[in-house]
Image (cartoon, helix red, strand yellow):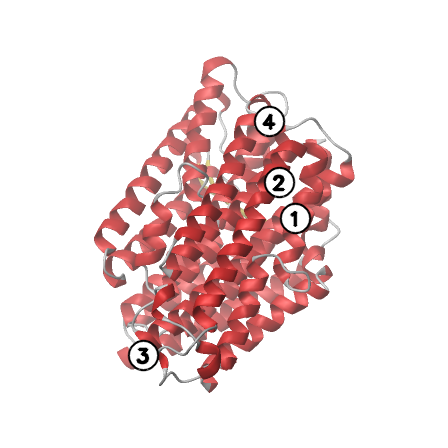
Amino acid sequence: MITGLIFIPLAGALLLSLAPRNYAREIALGFNVFSALLTVMLWRTFDTGAPGLQMVERHPWIPAIGAEYLVGIDGLSLLLVLLTSLIIPFAFLAQRMSRGFCAVMLVMQSALYGTFTAQNFVLWFLFYEMSLIPAFLLIKLWGGENRDRAATKFFLYTFLGSVAMLLSFLGIYFARGTFDFAALADLGKNGLLTGNVAWLAFAGVFLGLAVKVPLFPFHTWLPDAYESAPVGASMVLTGVLSKMGVYGFVRLLLPLFPNEIKTLGPWLLGLAVCSIVFASLAAWAQSDLKRMIAYLSVNHLGYCMLGLFAVTASAAGPLIDTQAALSGVFIQIFNHGITAAALFYYVGLLEQRRGLRGIDDFGGLMQRTPLLCGWMSVAMFSSLGLPGVNGFIGEFLIFKGSFAMAASFTAVAVIGLLVTAIAFMRAMQALFSGPLVESCSAFPDLQRSEKLVIVPVTLLMFAIGIAPQFIFNVFNTTVAHMARLFA
């Protein structure tokens, strides 16, 4: 089933080259329906009580270099496959798309499924790099004003990070003779490598993943990329692509280099806190709505890194706190993907109506578009972690677990919550309140097609915020297994 999931979007991309141009988005959405159905089948087949990999498919590929076609899922992989199956069709519905745009998006979807299910480094790296090329093309070919600079910056950062990671894993292979994630994780318990070689390998893998998250100070490519990308691409970049970095930390860096992470613990926690606090301050200072949400994306992923580093870099705390932090990280990955994609969608709606997206280009919208303002407010409250909506669950669990293991760093990180609230309140006051700006006096409120997109996503936010157990059930056993290993 996993192989079918990976190749369905590729088949859709090939079919689009033969299909009529006017029906490109409809065909792409049709293939997304097939992908979604297969994802639901995976979810129903998945045994939530088993901690290890399930539905494993293993075939010889390039035996000379230890490369296998090896795919499988655990709770974290299934969670990210579900997220991909939600965000990609959401992005297709966000804007009209050309045939080429739809084909590139489907290729990216296939690469994301492969990245989240591959269990051999060579295969994983192939899918990982395969996702970067469509992202570059989406920015370069269909982006906005500064697309050339943004696409080049995105490519250079991610390419250099990928090269560093590839060199590190080549060194690991020459020393240990395997690319298999499970085998490397077993070796990592007693030290994967020794001496300076271990630190060099750690640095290469860390750099590649830190750029992808992105973690401070490797984040400077992100605001330009998100600002220049078309709305649908921005939704995928923030909703799913950025999760590849966090996934890589959980799947690769933490199991393979536990000793190095523990040694550098305070420094890594410091970087996570900088991502949280500095990014929220930068968001507060922005006048462009897309750049504001881009910086808040760095801020929210910083919470994930705080939880991971608190668990692995600090003195081992009670098992219940370790599980709380890891559960918070996992559900924050999922919730941030939905909420950030929704916020970019709302900015796209405002830009379609006004032709601009600066905070000062609007005013008094509540008088003209009460539905748009109301639904957008829900997404904003979700992003700042208001109880009752999905954003609260992950942040609460991360801070609950992290306070027990890294209290001083977590206390400083709380500043990011306050500044995020200020940034959103400032934006809501400027957009929704005050006298109606003359250029906005002819704005239409939400149309029927837009309501059909917004309402299900918002209901999902409330469902997770009020009764999140159906999401926790996906990864509870995986979290318990990881918590025991880290303890």
Whether label 2 touches label 1, CB < 8 Å: yes
Identified by mark 1, the residue type is Gly
Q: Label 1: which residue?
A: 328
Residue type indicated by callout 4: Pro
Residue at (48% x, 73% y) in the render: 433
SS type, badge 3: helix
Q: Kindly identify the residue that appears in the image at 52 percent across and 55 percent down.
A: 422
Residue bearing mark 4: 258
Q: CA distance from mark 3 to mark 4?
A: 57 Å
Of badges 1 and 4, nearer the viewer stands: 1
Which of the marked residues, 1 or 4, is nearer the chain's N terminus?
A: 4
Spot occupied by residue 205 in the image (x, y as percentages of width and height): 45, 32
Q: The N terminus lies in which quarter of the figure?
A: bottom right
The disc, 3 or 4, on the residue closer to the chain's N-terminal end is 4
Determine which residue is flagged by label 2. 307
Kind of residue indicated by mark 3: Ser
Q: Nearer the viewer, residue 20 or 274?
A: 274
Q: Nearer the viewer, mark 3 or mark 4?
A: 3
Of the image marks 3 and 2, the number of the one nearer the N terminus: 2
In this rendered view, identify the residue nearer to me: 123 or 459.
459
